[in-house]
Image (cartoon, grey):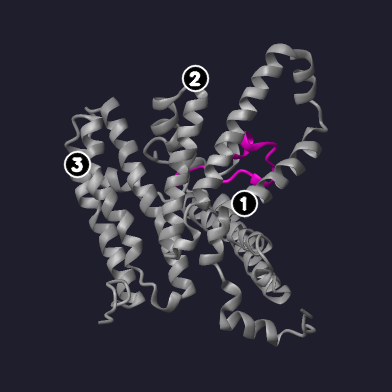
Amino acid sequence: MTGKSMFESISIYEGIGLFVLGYFFAFLPAYLVLSRAKSTWVTTICFIPLFALVMFLPLLIPNTEGAIFNKLLRFFLFLPLYNFVLRNIDLAVQRKNSPDEPFTFKYYLNFISTGFGTQDAPPEKRRSDFKEGFTYLFGALWDIGCGCIFILLNTYLRTEEWNYPFSVISKVGYMYWFASGMANLNFSYCRFTGKDVSAIYHAPIRALSPEDFWSNRLNLYIRGYLLRFVYLPIGGPKRPGIGILATFMVSGMIHEYQFDCASMDPAGFGWVFLYFNMHGLAVMTEQKLKRYFRRNHKAFYQKASQSPAMPFVFVPIHCLWQLFTGAIGYMSFDKIVDLHQLGFVQNFLASLPLPPFPM
């Protein structure tokens, strides 16, 4: 007997509809839990079934015939759900510190629904900044345009058909442009409406080292949550090595679920988790080396750290490290992203006056 699975029995439109309904109906129980919060631990435990629900929601997008957009939808829909749960837990911690402040549903929605971006406190009233809003808007259009050009270039050069790991490296480029563009769209909306959030990215291509990359430049809002919920309770300043390894392990498990949920292909299982653990070891080793040079070679350390030649030396080294580890860790990208196979991309490229690329 060959029957369809639950995921294949619904259309993509039904899957998106169920996802949206589930996401918005999750607001009410989350608010009820928070409004009656007496203990942070009890509140966090109450969010476990809600966490299970929102992690399950992307799976409602069916995997019919392995459609490209279905995979990408599951990949990107994971982000607001994950952020939703973390913000609720973060708000529960803040409620413990200020339990006497009024807590209305409007206040809750205003705090939770800001979208991407770091925000450690509820948004305060501020004026709309249209100049900065348009700056972010044009930045978003530029990023999305660059991502589209990358897709056309990769399709023309057929880089996604090259042998691994070059196929993965070609995909990570335009995925970064699209992620940056979506973040800038969100910041544009926040500036137009008067909400105050900080950027997720801070020029990650200029990172000097793994510690600089993860601490100061990439996914800063997720970094803030992991710092408060994992690093400080487990390690902190007294046991930084244990805290770093635990933080990257938790982050690796979360991202592993996101990639596996998107691809639904067991062939890519485990590579993302390995990538994050490699970087955890790199950050821990970097901190130990810095501590050693500060203690034993202080003059050399200060002179080297202040040298203007530092970026020219360490940025290329770090880029090579990212390419090496990314080629290993993001092997599952090949199971998710294959935009060069889209018919309208190939048709548009064929309409341009370009000579056929020899293979």
Q: Are marks 1 and 2 in contact (CB under 8 Å)?
A: no
Q: Is residue 155 left or right of residue 201?
A: right
Vertical placement of 88 versus 42: above or below?
Answer: below
Label 2, secondary structure: give it. loop
Which labelled disc corresponds to residue 237?
2
Vertical placement of 352 versus 221: above or below?
Answer: below
Q: Is residue 133 visible?
A: yes
Q: CA distance from mark 3 to mark 2?
A: 32 Å
User: Which range is magenta?
Assistant: 194-213
Amino acid at dot 3: Val
Q: CA distance from mark 1 to mark 2?
A: 29 Å
Residue at horizontal 63 percent and vertical 37 percent from the top: 210
Residue 309 position, x and y percent, is 83, 33
Amino acid at dot 1: Gly
Vertical placement of 164 versus 11: above or below?
Answer: above
Residue at horizontal 48 percent and vertical 54 percent from the top: 186
Query: From this viewpoint, which residue is outermost toward the right?
Result: 309
Residue 259 position, x and y percent, is 46, 57
Label 3, secondary structure: give it. helix
Q: Which residue is mark 3?
A: 33
Which labelled disc corresponds to residue 326?
1
